[in-house]
Image (cartoon, grey):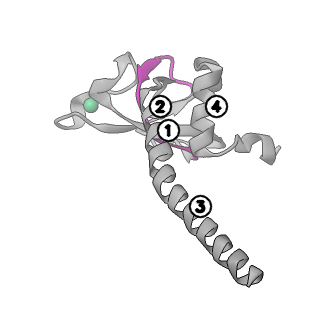
Amino acid sequence: MLRFAFKALWRLLRLAVRLMVMVLKPTFGLAWRLTLGRSVAYVRRDWNDRGVGRSQLRDPRWDTLSGGAQVENPLPLLHGYVWCDKVRGEIGHSCAHGPGPHNIKVCMLREDNTRLVWRRLLDVAGPDCRLESG
Ligand SMILES: [Zn+2]
């Protein structure tokens, strides 16, 4: 009898936890995405591009291929996508190739960004893979 009660309680507890996760996961996920969306990063068209702009960005990830000229970098860099009309500042992009706004690929450098922004980017993109590769 006690065992049965214990089992029922356990099952109830598991159900409660599962429900809680179901409710909390999207809530926290949304909150996190909003925080990330609000964090504005400094971006460049390419790592050696002198122009730096500020923009909200989407989909940060490690990639060796730059946007625009599609230059292959020897080391993976943190890249993301921005709308060219939302970038404040001068980055190496002209809207010459067609009607905008354009979804352009940009790269982020650690030295351009604050530690907080960088940490948020890494939370989404994954840890700095340059450290692993040596
Ligand atoms: Zn453009």
Is the distance from the Cβ of mark 3 to the nearest ligand 1 atom less than 8 Å?
no
Q: Are marks 2 and 1 in contact (CB under 8 Å)?
A: yes
Identify residue for label 1. Answer: 32
Query: 14 and 111: which one is in front?
Result: 14
Marks 3 and 4, how far apart at CA: 29 Å
The circle drawn on residue 17 is: 3
Is the distance from the Cβ of mark 1 to the nearest ligand 1 atom less than 8 Å?
no
Location of residue 53 by image quarter: top left
Query: 44 and 48: which one is in front?
Result: 44
Identify residue for label 2. Answer: 35
Where disc 2 sits, the SS reads helix
Q: Which residues are magenta?
A: 48-63
Tell us which disc is closer to us: 3 or 4: 3
Identify residue for label 4. Answer: 119
Task: Give, as a three-letter code, the residue at label 4.
Answer: Arg
* Magenta highlight on residue 50: yes
Marks 4 and 2, how far apart at CA: 12 Å
Query: 4 and 36: which one is in front?
Result: 4
Q: Position of residue 133 (x, y in %)?
A: 79, 47
**Dot 2 crowding, Cα within 10 Å, few <14, some 14–19, many 20+:** few
Marks 3 and 2, how far apart at CA: 26 Å
